[in-house]
Image: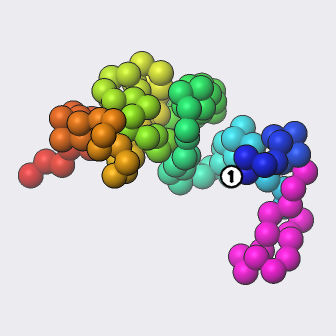
Amino acid sequence: MDSVSWQTVPFLHLLTPDRRSVTGYFVPDITGVFTYCNQHGLRTPMIFDTKTQEAVRAIDRLAQENFSSPSQVVGVKVNATLYPPYSAFKADAPTIRGIPVFTTNMLSKINVPAVPLSPATIRRG
């Protein structure tokens, strides 16, 4: 999607599941997705793949505006190098869940075994 401007995206149609033709549905923005979920009483967890701290903060703000318990329905995947301590993530996004993503190319950038896990990701017993 880097090659398409955001001003163009709302005018694009979604494809059918077999990807052979377009539907009458348009690509929604996050506010549109949250609004739809609220209108229809949906509480299905939504996970967004984010690349920047700005995107994390924006999703957290929109989640706060749209849900009474955002952490129950909204989470974001983030590169572990973006928020090495989980506390930094929670400072930017206090109401949604963070899912750190570790890849092999991070081994030279971050000491993966030394990264503390968030309380939500620690399995008990």
Q: Is 104 left or right of 25, judged from the image as shown?
A: left
Q: Is 88 left or right of 67, judged from the image as shown?
A: left
What type is the residue that disc 1 sits on? His
125 vs 71: above or below = below
Frontmost residue, 2 versus 93: 2
Q: Position of residue 41 (x, y in %)?
A: 62, 49
- Kindly indicate the quadrant of the structure image that contains residue 121: top left
**Element under disc 1:** loop
Residue under label 1, please give it.
Answer: 40
Furthest toward the left, the residue is 125
Q: Residue at x 75, y 43 (%)?
A: 29
Q: Is 82 left or right of 31, judged from the image as shown?
A: left
Q: Position of residue 12 (x, y in %)?
A: 87, 56
What's the coloring here?
A: rainbow
Say if the magenta span includes residue 26. Answer: no
Q: Can I make out residue 75 in this image?
A: no
How many numbered marks are there? 1
Frontmost residue, 79 versus 32: 79
Furthest toward the front, the residue is 108
Furthest toward the top, the residue is 91
Frontmost residue, 25 versus 22: 22
Q: Is 118 left or right of 93, judged from the image as shown?
A: left
Q: Position of residue 34 (x, y in %)?
A: 67, 42
116 vs 77: above or below = above
Q: Residue at x 56, y 46 (%)?
A: 48
Q: Which residues are magenta?
A: 11-24
Q: Can I make out residue 26 in this image?
A: yes
63 vs 17: above or below = above
Q: Residue at x 47, y 44 (%)?
A: 77
Q: Residue at x 53, y 27 (%)?
A: 53
Q: Position of residue 14 (x, y in %)?
A: 80, 63
